[in-house]
Image (cartoon, helix red, strand yellow):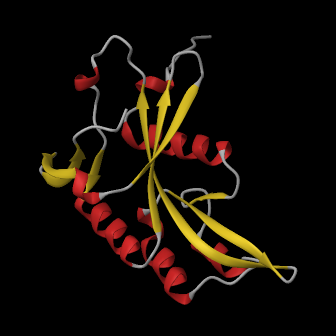
Amino acid sequence: MDKEYHSLKDIKRTSKGIIGEIIFKQSRNFIHCTKLSRSEMLDKLPFNIPEEIHKFLNTYWNSLDCFEFCLKKEEERLVFKQLILYEVKTHNYMPYLKKQFYRKSTFTENQIKIYNEAKNKGIIVKIAKLLLFDNWRYTITIYDFNHEKYKYILCNGTKSFQKDSFPS
């Protein structure tokens, strides 16, 4: 029987991104991934979320990676306090490359629009950078999203944004 061996590090873009989102979800409590659930889950929560937040999540469900509800307990019930959105960026660790040659994370114009709209609604937006190592280990570093640190680039014929570099 012929066997083919593959490396997760060789997987391109979308598949590796979904794997990164699953790893991120498993590494933290109370994270929801839009690729792993349907927006109908918003109607089955054991707490109420503001209508504006509910509408935002429903509208952009397929464009978001992960999110987290911050809750507080009041009089024996859970109360919505804040929503945090996470854009998960998954990269391979390549120790032989100098930092300036690493593939930089890109954002589409639509992603920037959505995250800016979220921030205007008081939603916290974060970038979760997941770095995959050869030995099955990984690191996750979380940054605040700030659209002013991104610039336009031409990527496959479409406008997108690219951060100059992640903070060290």
In-front residue for pair 9/121: 121
In the picture, the quarter occupied by the C terminus is top left
Question: At which x and y percent is residue 136?
Answer: 60, 21
Is 130 situated left or right of 135 in this image?
Answer: left
Question: At which x and y percent is residue 167?
Answer: 35, 38
In-front residue for pair 21/126: 126
Q: In which quarter of the image is residue 95?
A: top left
Question: At which x and y percent is residue 41?
Answer: 66, 73
Q: In which quarter of the image is residue 159?
A: bottom left
Above or below residue 18? Residue 77 is below
In-front residue for pair 53/122: 122
Q: Which residue is drawn at 32% across and 57% down?
A: 146
Question: At which x and y percent is residue 47?
Answer: 73, 80
Q: Which residue is drawn at 28% across and 36% down?
A: 104
Q: Which residue is drawn at 62% across and 10% down?
A: 1
Above or below residue 58? Residue 21 is above
